[in-house]
Amino acid sequence: MSTLFSPVKVGPFEFAHRVVLAPLTRMRAEAGARPGPLMAEYYSQRTSEGGFLIGEATIAAENGNGYLGAPGLYEDSQIAGWKQVTDAVHAKGGTIFLQLYHAGRQSNAQLQPGGDRPVGPSEIPHGGVAYTEAGWVPNTPNREITVEEIQGLVESFRTAAQRGIAAGFDGVELHAANGYIFDQFLQDGSNKRTDSYGGSIENRARFLLEATKAVISVWGNRKVAVRIGPSGEFGDMHDSNPEALFTYVAAELNKLDIAYVHVIEPRVVGNVDDETKDQSPVAAQTIRKFFHGTLIAAGGFKRDTAQAIIAAGTADLVAFGRDFIANPDLPERLRRDLPLNAYDRPTFFGGTEVGYTDYPFYSDSSAQVEETVE
């Protein structure tokens, strides 16, 4: 029986354990959406020998940002910054995937080239906020993207994936969850198009599958992955038949034989854990029936629940977010069942090293406790 600390093979990679750093938007990039030394230190701290990290949502096209301080790979000038990060991870024996995203309608004109309106599949009023120089502000109502622009975005994901190779990443994960552009196309609450990218489930999944194949053309299928959030409500997301939609997506991704599918479980509502929220019909246990490769589960897991989903065979690895933010040595703490640092939510997004690289490792925190006792 597999455990959280048994080895696992993912695509061409072998990992020593199954504790994954989830892709976490931290908004610490420098001017020009370039990673700097602080980001390199952050990822280095969370790297363990034989461990797997997924980089934070990285902008694939110039008009794809929803958060000031998010990093990008839509320009060659951003490669060197990411190379600092990947070099730091590799130096400690870790593996890191690039996560590419486009915010779509989840953006504000202040973040768009020339102050333009954000793009999305359809013009539908929605809530949500973006982070700009003015702080958190309401999203600007989006315009409907054209078919030609969709095809241009597919190419943007391809070229961003190419830059990922130059930046030293080990693979690519496409972010198709959390109400961003792929998710907006997938779900019929946000997609009311009547062309080849709207209407039927097959049409609504077309953009994601085209982009996935474009990235595969660069990396090969076993180094490409997709993240989905079948039960996510962030960004006013909803679908009339999520089970049919996401099982179709899972089956189509299964045909592509990609490295893994990353599923956000429905156990988190907004920022609050909800263990009573129904885990069916669309969670890892459902996706497993249609995608027969590696599954990563994410969403409010603790040591015991992570152990349980691995032991049950429902997922192969578990991605941790908030606890990995606060505990750079999380895999070791979980392995030894050590106490965890508490996370500080106000410092999650943007800022300095505070709440980013200043969380103590267990040896540091235990020494502080001993010093206090003395």
Image: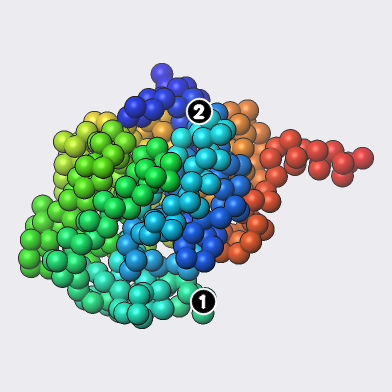
**Relative to 308, is 347 on the left or the right?**
right
Can residue 314 be seen here? The reply is no
37 left or right, relative to 161 = right
Q: Most extreme residue toward the right, as rendered?
A: 374
Q: CA distance from mark 2 to mark 1?
A: 39 Å
For badge 1, the amino acid type reads Glu
Give coordinates of residue 350: x percent, y percent: 56, 64
Label located before the other in sequence (2 or 1): 2
Residue at numbered disc 2: 50
Image height of 14 relative to 243, above or below: above
Coloring basis for residues: rainbow
Q: Secondary structure at mark 1?
A: loop
Name the residue at 74% across, 35% down.
Answer: 363
Q: Which label sits on residue 303?
A: none
Please name the residue shown 61% across and 31% down the image: 332
Q: Which mark is residue 133?
A: 1
Residue at point 13% right, 66% down?
147
